[in-house]
Image (tube, coloured by chain):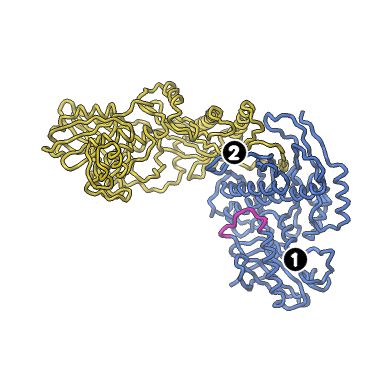
Amino acid sequence: MVVTDSSDSGTILRVRGPLEFKCQLDSTDALLMQKVISRTFATLHSQVKSESCVLTVCDSSLIIWPNKGVYVTPEEITPNTLCEDIHQWIQTDEQESAGKRSSKKKNKKSSAASVINLRLMMEVTKTGPLSAPILRRTLQKSHFLSTTLPMDCVVRTTCSDTIKDAFERLLEALTHQLCEMEKVTLQHMKGATLLVPEPLHFLLPEPKGLVTVVYPAGVPDSQLETHRKELHQQFELPDDWPYFRRANAFHFSNEPYKDGYLRNPHVVLTHPTLDNGKVYLVQGIYSYHHYMQDHMDDNGWGCAYRSLQTICSWFTQQGYVERAVPTHREIQQTLVDVGDKQGSFVGSRQWIGSIEVQVVLNQLLEVTSKIMFVSQGSELASKGRELANHFLTEGTPIMIGGGVLAHTILGVAWSETTGQIRYLILDPHYTGAEDLQVITDKGWCGWKGPDFWDQTAYYNLCLPQRPKVI
Amino acid sequence: MGRSYIVEDAVEGCLSKLCEQKAGSVTGLLLGQSSPQRDFVVMATRTPPREETPAGNPVDKEWVSEHARQVSRMLPGGLSVLGVFIITDTEAKDTLTTLRQLVFAMESLVSSEQLWSPAEDDVSDCVALHVNRKTRKTFCRTFDVKDPKSTAKPADWRYQAGVCSSWSMVSCCLHVDMLVPLPDNKTDPENMDKCLKEELRGWAQRLESGVCLMDGRKLAEDAELPGGQKRNVRQTYTAQILVTPSEQRLADEEQRCGGSVSIRGAVHSRAYLHSNKPKARLAQKLLKRDAVSTVTTRVQMLLEELLTSEDENKSSSKQKRELFCLPHRVFCPLKASGPLCVCDYQFSDESVCEVTERLKEMLDIDAAEEDLDSSQEAPGEITEREVGAEPTVETVVALVPKRNSFIGVAMATAVALLATAASMLYLNDV
């Protein structure tokens, strides 16, 4: 995919909050149960539309009542204030991440539209006097359902949107989400068991932007294909990229990844400009796997394993598979299982090459790969077109093994007219910590020229093919 | 350096009067507000006489504790039982053990009813005051009730005029909406109590972590309340409380139940703040605690009534749906002490004179009916319907309370007869 600059500069407002869902099901008749569920959703609708519904801006003293003429406190802000101005009221820890300080690195792509986080709350106080509480006791054998709906809505604003505009849209988004949740809940009810409807956001190609979809919790992606087909039709998306698999949900920049691996370290780099050249990069998200991670000392022998792990992480994170990245042992065991290696292979420190990578990808992830062979490293300079095509159509990371080393190719910069070529390399030989600054400064993830390769050694490249599914 | 108690002048008068009474020991409670630097005592109230025991008997620890428990229910936010006093003819050192036992017993009973979690800046010292009847000399000591091995520490006891004349008040009207399932075959009041207590605990936690606005603004915790310290000007603040609608539960619950209990309505909650530059954090803490305690107290009172009435009417058919009105809150000013009020709860068919009687018994306050303020809450109305509920026969049980009070047995019997005579009203939802 050719890299395009994101010209989006608006702000995303994201509101999250739990809504309590409680109801009593007196009978097991399906229709009656549906009526009770719908009635409960109706109560939630009126809660969200009531004057008690409040949205608070995280890390600030801003509180908005969207149903009271979009009333805002503190008074310095009015409904006609521009949305962008909300940023000034938010307290942040001014600790920029290491990779962004250096002037050499451009980070436009990683800082997409900024996000303002909001919390959905309810005001429990009212102007009194009101009547004292009544206790109602109902004696009826029934099922009591109690769960929490995890509301999560986003609204994109432009620089000219006022708070009033934006918050009215947020409220519409909340109401719409409740409707979606009701639909999904009723659709997937099993007897008296409810599946919690979970909203997820997906980033679609411009101009569609962020889109929110509600999926029933616990139902795996494999059973939701019909739902995804409908979404692809609705948004007129091609059928060969899994835009709506859960793993592809949009990751907001302020949420760290729990596993600690770096994602897409290449995005902070400045890409080379070649005469009449274009840059072709890996699509989607991968994690950086390298020597010494996971308390595994594979220094000197594990580079191909790590490259394979990076490739596997790509397939998991795009939602093609639901398995964790395999360990060295699992990789070795797989090769034994298919008969490619003897049993003694497991637990050894033997190297693997691109053929083994292809075998494991096929066996564990059901992914097929193409093998490209070059008899000399110098020939790689002439492979620009093929590599560019690979990144355009498949978009997967490439494992390259030769000489005594293995690397991962994440992209090429190639000029059709001059033949100039550069390779974006992710180096698995790095033994340090997950420090983006070090990794990019020292070139562990960086652009290399054709002289990076051993000019006389032969190389095998494993090019994983993306399954054309949704 | 011990604690310092600033005491309202009127308390001195009250203690003197008690000294003039009969021989034997007189005990009572000291009420007021603690702060990390000093404590304020605004009122002293004697332990009500117990009928079965003649005056002059050894101090009854359980009776004093029970009095403290009942009085705590009558104190709005910011006011609490700070400790006990004892008036005897003996030396201060002789009453030390008694005072110590009283303080610990009382604290233990009162705190067992509290559903909120203790805060780090809570003061855990209780005052134990000894007054020598003959010399009128006071001997003030404190015990740390968090430490079972604590010994008495000397404390300062100083009288002052107008201690609480410029205290401020923060208040709000809080909407309550709870729905709790009752386990199968266990729908009696005891189980209702257990289920409701758990729900109330969760509700108290949500309230504690909720955002509190003072007069429409969110203040930093360390900020002083706006309005400054103008003397003789009483500040009142209206609070708003925002909560996250539910806890983030990991698992959804689906359970068989034998029924459910819901509580819906509003309560008036208030807290008084001392005038020594109170911070927003204190105001929030005291107000939220009052909110939790006023709802909890009323539910307790109602369940106590249900328990006794169901015990006696074992044959009564269990109605499918029953509605009970929680008592509403009535305030009574402490005249000599400025803006402060105590409160009591009035069931829908109690008369106002019963409130004034209880105020006299518990707090020795002579209040006239006109002094009472019942305007903060309206008595519970039974006009609400759920959205789309089917019409049913709803039973409203008007409870005539037979309180665990100190009123004589004769009164209780008359009240019980009234209860059985005519207390079932049927309402048709049309």
- Residue A308 included in the magenta stretch of the image: no
The residue at the far left in this view is A456
Quarter of the picture containing the N terminus of chain A is top left
Question: At 62% across and 42% down in the image, what residue appears?
Answer: A124
Of A2 and A228, nearer the camera is: A228
Under tag 2, what secondary structure? strand
Q: Is residue A144 above or below residue B363?
A: above
The disc labelled 1 sits on which kind of residue? Gly
- Residue B119 included in the magenta stretch of the image: yes
Of B101 and A117, nearer the camera is: B101
Q: Colour of chain B?
A: blue
Under tag 1, what secondary structure? strand
Q: Is residue B105 above or below residue A47?
A: below
Residue B28 numbered tag: 1
Q: Which residue is mark 2?
A: B254
Question: At 68% across and 40% down in the image, what residue appears?
Answer: B258
The location of residue A374, given as percent across then percent down, is 15, 32
Ranked by sequence position, the earlier of labels 1 and 2 is 1
Query: Would you say the magenta stretch is mainly helix, strand or loop?
Result: loop
Quarter of the picture containing the C terminus of chain A is top left
The location of residue B377, given as percent across then percent down, is 73, 44
* Range shown magenta: B112-121
CA separation in Å, label 1 and label 2: 50 Å
The subunit letter for the residue under badge 1 reads B
Of B286 and A326, nearer the camera is: A326
The answer to which quarter of the image holds residue A373 is top left
The disc labelled 2 sits on which kind of residue? Glu
Question: At 14% across and 36% down in the image, what residue appears?
Answer: A458
Q: Colour of chain A?
A: yellow
Q: Is residue B322 above or below residue A372?
A: below
Residue A244 numbered tag: none
